Amino acid sequence: AEQCAVSCETVRRDLIYLEGQGVLRRVFGGAVTNPVHGTFPDLMSRRGSRKIQKEAVARKLSELIREGDVLSLDAGTTALEIAMMLRTNFRNLTVLTYSLEVFRMLQEHFTVLLTGGEYYAREGIFHGEIACKAASELHTGMCILCPSAIDPESGIEDYLPCAAPVQRALMLHSDRVIVAADSAKYGSRALIRLCDVSPAHLYLTDGELDRETAEAFQRKGLT
């Protein structure tokens, strides 16, 4: 606003317009470029990104889990932060996952079920028919989904075509779906559409979620 000699409201309107054109995505305190179909960094490259925010999501999730729960846990860097929280805060859980890294982190602490299947080394996950079959034959009380993008109109999206069928199977065969993602992923887009947003899901994020995005979710009746 200072550099362009305009009001903050003008800047805000311009950012809304540019977001509508798909040029950028508004976040708390500003905006970032919008990688709708950009490259998706591998797992290790993403480990340090927004770590504080992902830890905040994991801490909030810990309030919803009880000893003895049976969970399914997604893959990705947020899932790894959640796995770290689980092994720190709980003693008795059963966890189903298709992530080899999550399995390695939890195997000595809980009963952990790994789907098996075709291995995708870049992301450290199992996928394919065997993975989907294993996910569909096991029933969990809670599915913790960690997608790349969540938008009240476009739905829940992610980047890996091979992982999407496994994620859908985990959601379908669970009593409750909790969508856990840091605030930068809310109001954004990714490549693969997993499902609609739903009032039956619970959406967890960190305290940096901007008010307009939060209100858009509330207007949809989403918690």
Image (cartoon, rainbow, N blue to C red):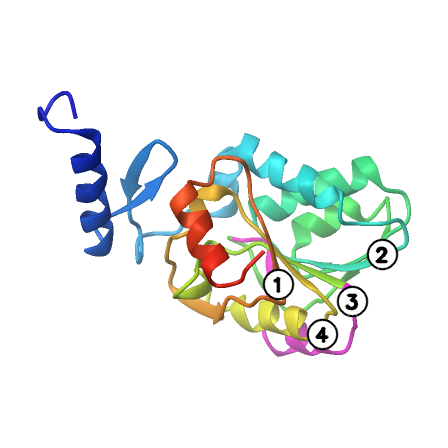
Q: Earlier in the sequence, mark 2 or mark 1?
A: 2
Reply yes or no: does residue 124 show up in magenta: yes
The magenta-colored residue range is 123-141
Q: For residue 173, which numbered disc appears in the image? A: 4
Whether residues under marks 2 and 4 lie with C-beta atoms below 8 angstroms apart, the answer is no
Amino acid at pointer 2: Asp
Mark 4 and mark 1: Cα distance apart in space: 14 Å
Q: Nearer the viewer, residue 171 or 101?
A: 171
Whether residues under marks 4 and 3 lie with C-beta atoms below 8 angstroms apart, the answer is yes
- Give residue 127's position: percent from left, percent from top: 59, 68
State the residue position of label 2. 69
Label 3 secondary element: loop
Amino acid at pointer 3: Thr
Quarter-wise, where is residue 157 in the image? bottom left
Residue at 81% from the left image edge and 49% from the top image edge? 107
State the residue lying farthest toward the left. 5
Q: Residues within 10 Å of mark 4 (few under 14, many from 20)?
A: some
Residue at 63% from the left image edge and 48% from the top image edge? 79
Looking at the rendered image, the disc whose residue lies closer to the viewer, 2 or 1, is: 1
State the residue position of label 1. 201
Residue at 85% from the left image edge and 49% from the top image edge? 66
Q: Is residue 116 above or below residue 104?
A: below
Label 2 secondary element: loop
